[in-house]
Amino acid sequence: VPTGAPTKIAKETPSPTKSVNTPPPVPENPPECTGENTNPVLVPFAFKGIDVPTNNLGFFCGKDATEGDGECGPGAAPEIVYKSVGVAEVAGNGATSITLVVRNTNEYKPYQPPPSSSPTEEGANKDGFGNNGILENVGQINLANGQSVNLEFEFQDANNPGVAVAVSGYFCFFDLDTLKTCDEITSKEVTVLPDNNCATSPTTCKIGGPYGRDVVRFPTSQIATDPVIDEYPDILRASTSYVCMDNETLEGETSFWGTKAYLQGADNPGNFEFDNGALKFTSASTNFPQNTYACYDFENKKVLTHTYEVVGEQKGTGRNLVFSALLWICVP
């Protein structure tokens, strides 16, 4: 998978000056709701407090997992299982409890912290693969700086383990940022950039660029309707977004990547919820997460594939991919 800077950057629509939440549009083909339950409703995943019976991505023991009891290590499957994390409308079954299973399909290289030392890199992720699992009410996967990993996210019937089911909804990524700003400014005091200047500074605001940048790529065919940059009816971002989007540089792929330096001490999204179709955050830093998320609409998928990359030199420690989803169900 190419990791260098692209030669072509998609045109971005100028963003409004005020950051507001934009509700996701009703998809062109919402789930068919019949009988007494005629109204489609989006229901978010709820990670907080759920059972994670296996936390073993790439055979690395994740957060709160114990080797030797089936949760992680060589005797467990190399995956993370989020049991009964959500509910979705499934053809023939109605509202169904959903388990999310995440697997790597190529070599996975998280940050591996030294046994008895502390990292010195500013903003370092000291826990490395020990962060894998849950971060408050979202899912989380660690990756070492300068690395890339291909991930499968499979939706399974929670009452029939191993049985994948087709669901529809939105898949979301949060906290897409970078260790440096697009302008290569290293000071953590300078964190506010011109509104989504992907187009105005193509030599610095790009998929490549600064060290420690979060990039997510996935097949454009996974989006319910191919995204149109000027309108993106099936893409959800804040109106003043620090997440760039490109569906032209890599043929058949859509990319999201961060342009904003993380906020020291407040660089995670915290709790969030979907309130009447809009993103509502409850975090110590209310502006940060609103500007660094991106979601896309998908329909009738059993598995979604995403490539997560931390762009830049293979130095320092690592970064975290933070994710969630909301799925359609039918209600009276």
Image: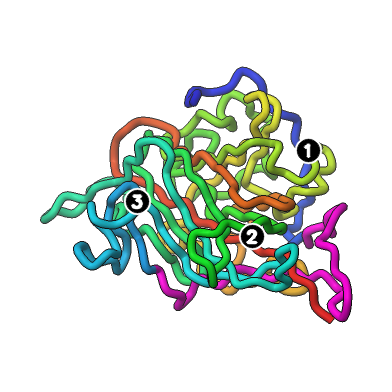
Rendered residue at 34%/51% (across/down): 78
Marks 2/3: CA distance? Answer: 33 Å
Residue segment shown in magenta = 23-52
Rendered residue at 68%/58% (across/down): 167
User: Element under label 2?
Assistant: helix
Left/right of residue 34 with respect to residue 122 in the rendered view: right
Label disc, if present, on residue 290 of the rendered structure:
2
Q: Nearer the viewer, residue 33 or 143?
A: 33
Q: Amino acid at mark 3?
A: Pro
Residue 38 against residue 287 in the figure, above or below: below
Q: Nearer the viewer, residue 291 or 116?
A: 116
Task: Looking at this view, name the residue that lies furthest to the left.
Answer: 116
> The C terminus is located in which quarter?
bottom right
**CB contact under 8 Å: marks 2 and 3:** no
Rendered residue at 53%/65% (across/down): 99
Label disc, if present, on residue 226 of the rendered structure:
1
- The answer to whether residue 148 of the structure is visible from this angle is yes
Label disc, if present, on residue 78 of the rendered structure:
3
Quarter of the view holding residue 259: top right
